[in-house]
Image (spheres, helix red, strand yellow):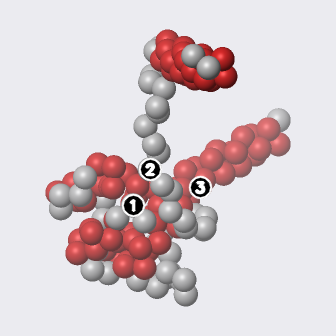
Amino acid sequence: MFSRIIRSNNALIQRASFSTQSALLRNAQPKPSAEIPTPEAFLNKIGRNTIEHLEHFPSWHALFNTTSRQMKEKGIDVQSRRYIINMLEKYRCGEPIKEFKKGKKSYFGGEYKRKEVTAKIWAEQRKQRYELLEAEDKANRGE
């Protein structure tokens, strides 16, 4: 009976300590590395023209402690703000930093129109091939 109570208390303690550790880890500011020693180097490394926001991050401390709301007040657009915050979190977790290119817009349309659009494209390509074959046949027959 007492062992169950002890086990349940240990589980509660572990759960409680885990929840506070995640908050502490989230606010942890990593040290600059040899590869990324300054905010300028970090913004250059992550790409997407985020270097234009360098004036808002004069120091390493400012880069890692600026919140999304503060970035918004400084005039950083939503996509750049989310991208910078995402990359800061990856750097905090020790993941390698690299540039993620922006995705390209789909050529074939959205989910509902994709079949229709691709069918039209294929029909147009078949029509062009048919016309080309007809022109070659006429040339071969001497017409």
**Which mark sits nearer the N-terminus, 2 or 3?**
3
Residue 111 picture location, percent across and down: 49, 19
Q: Residue 17 — which label? A: 3
Q: Can you identify the residue that label 2 sits on?
A: 102
Residue 81 in percent (x, y) is at: 32, 55
- On screen, 129 above or below 42? above
Query: What amino acid type should be assigned to the residue bearing mark 2?
Result: Lys
Image quadrant of residue 60? bottom left
Measuring from the top left, give residue 100's x and y in whole percent: 50, 56
C-alpha span from label 3 to label 1: 38 Å
Q: Secondary structure at mark 2?
A: loop
Q: Nearer the viewer, residue 29 or 124?
A: 124
Residue 114 seen in this snapshot: no
Quadrant of the snapshot with the N terminus: top right
Q: Disc 1 designates what residue?
A: 48
Location of residue 12 (image quadrant): top right
Left/right of residue 129 with respect to residue 27 in the rendered view:
right
**Res. 57 in view:** yes
**Pair 2/3: label in front:** 2
Q: How many labels sit on residues? A: 3
Q: Is residue 127 above or below residue 17?
A: above
